[in-house]
Every structure is written in C-alpha cells, then in structure tokens.
Image (tube, rainbow, N blue to C red):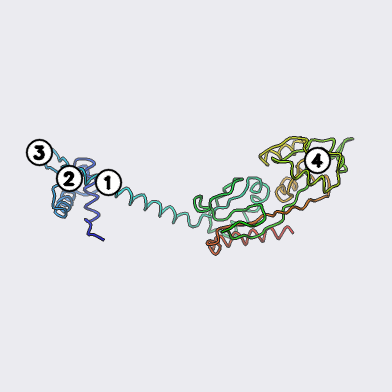
Amino acid sequence: MKKLPPLNALRAFEAAARHKSFTAAAGDLFVTHGAVSRQIRHIEEFLGRRLFERLPRGVELTDEGREYAAVVRRALEQVAEASDAIRTRADEKQILTISTTPRFAVGWLMSRLHLFQRDFPQYGIRISSTTRLVNFERERIDVAIRYGRGNWPGLSVTRLFDHEEVPVCAPALLEGPDALQFPEDLARVRLLHDGSYQYWRSWLDFAGIDNVDPHEGWVMDDPNVLFQAAIQGQGVALANPRTVETELRDGKLVQPFDLVLATDVAAYAVCPEQNADDPKVRAVIEWLVAQAEAQE
C-alpha cells in the first residue's frame, strides 16, 4: 500500500476545510488551535503543496486544497460508514431472527417463545412475520419456518410436523336446533376459505360428502382474519390444529368433527446450509423440534 498521511492530520484538514477556520476545527476535534495548525503543516509537508492560504482574518483553501478536501471528506465518510456497519453487525451477533407466517407466529410460536428465552437468555429475539419466501442474507434471517415438501436447494431442512386440516368453528355453531353434528350439516353453514378452495375440496372428498359445494362461502387472504371470522360465528374454516392451538385451548374455536385430512406438506425449520452449525441457529432448531415432538 502506498504511504498515507497520518489519520489525525487528515481529520484536522477535513475539519479546517469544512469550517474554513483552524479555530473552529480545533473546537470540533477538542484540541488546541496550535495542534490543528501543526497537523495542517504536517500534511502540507507530506504533499509538498500548500492547501490553505493564510489570510489576516482566517484561511482559504487553495485550488489543490479544495480538490483534496472533497476526496478526504468522501474517504473519511466511507471509513465511518464501514465502521458503523461492522459495529452494528457485532451488536447483532446475539440477535436471533426467526421468519414465519403471521398465523404460525400467533397460533403456535408466541405461546412457547418465552420457554426458549428462559433456556437461552443470551439471545435477543426478533420475529419477522411474512407469508413470502425471505432472502436470508439480505434480511439477516437466521431460521425460517416454511410449509412445503422440504425440497429447497441450498437450505438445511429439518422437519417439525405434518400439515393436517380439520374444520373449526365457534362453539355457538354446535348449539341449538341447527347445531353441526355430522359433516353433511356443513350444507347449512358458510364455508370460510384461506385464499383458495383446495383444502375444502380435499376435505369434503375425504369425508365422502357430496351435498356441500366446496366453492361456497367467503375467501380471505389473511389467515388471522379468516379465523377471527370463524371465532365470531361467521362460518366454518379449515385449519391445521397446531396453528389454532391457542384458540382451541381457550375455547374460542372447537372441532365439530373428528375427521383429520392429512396433506402432502409439512412444516420445516430451514436455514442456509452454511449456517447450520451456527450455535444460535442450532439451538433454536433443536428447540423447535423438541417443542413439536412434545405435541406428538
């Protein structure tokens, strides 16, 4: 590397060029006027050029001084930005970021997360709730919980549990003369769909029901809105029992029938292959597996 002027001299020059005053630069740097003057002289001797014109009432940059000041300022800003970025990453090393769907976070993860924090107090926790596939590196995600068949290239994949579908509804729909007793009774109520009709078609076929139109009812893109509608008695929704665990336990939702539709997808904890041995990644994945197995 080529020889560079001392950093203190560059900082003194940048401050003096910005203020057009050695005195103001000294105030910025918490040094004396004489110290700034010596640093400027040092850098001028290093360059073999005058950077300031000394005037009776202050200083003015020479043409070369103005050119040099722009380069030095840009270089110091880049050093400061790079330093901040590294400090930020160092501060975030103990932050564990988990990406999952809003429904999984609300219905399953949040009721258990305090147990992870109890066992691993050294980690801060950040939950990124989204339905899209995240970019692990750009978004600084450590672990994501995804539904699928487990075939994501470049990712380390750990199965948590199978995805199943059961009808759920408000307890009120099981009361009165029109109470739901058999799957055929679904013909009398509104079906609630999660953005498609796929699972209701599959569940009705599985139950052998042909008097219910699987395309009837309301379609909602947000599962949290869907289950809130079910809680309010607006109809019957299909759900993975695990993701409405809280609502089932609190009695806000009930399962009117025992028929459980198995699907060909499952919930997985995933991370980039190169990060699989990171201690905090390994800790949270092993914890997720243990929590899932405790429900089996």
Q: Mark 3 or mark 2: name the one nearer the start of the chain.
A: 3
Decide: few, some or many residues near mark 3? Use Cα within 10 Å; few <14, some 14-19, many ≥20: few
The residue beneath circle 4 is: 171
Closer to the camera, 102 or 254?
102
Q: Is residue 187 above or below residue 160?
A: above
Tag 4, which secondary structure? Answer: helix
The residue beneath circle 2 is: 64
Closer to the camera, 119 or 257?
257
Closer to the camera, 30 or 236?
236
The residue beneath circle 1 is: 73
Whole-angstrom CA distance, mark 3 to mark 2, is 21 Å
Q: Amino acid at mark 4?
A: Pro
Q: Is residue 221 above or below residue 148?
A: above
Decide: few, some or many residues near mark 4? Use Cα within 10 Å; few <14, some 14-19, many ≥20: some
Q: Amino acid at mark 2?
A: Glu
Q: Are marks 2 and 1 in contact (CB under 8 Å)?
A: no
Tag 2, which secondary structure? Answer: helix
Q: Which mark is residue 56?
A: 3
**Residue occupying the far bottom of the picture:** 277
Q: Residue at x 67, y 50 (%)?
A: 108
Q: Is residue 249 above or below residue 282?
A: above
Name the spot of residue 195 as percent of width and height, x first.
69, 40
Q: Which numbered mark, 1 or 3, is in the foreground of this view?
A: 1
Decide: few, some or many residues near mark 2? Use Cα within 10 Å; few <14, some 14-19, many ≥20: few
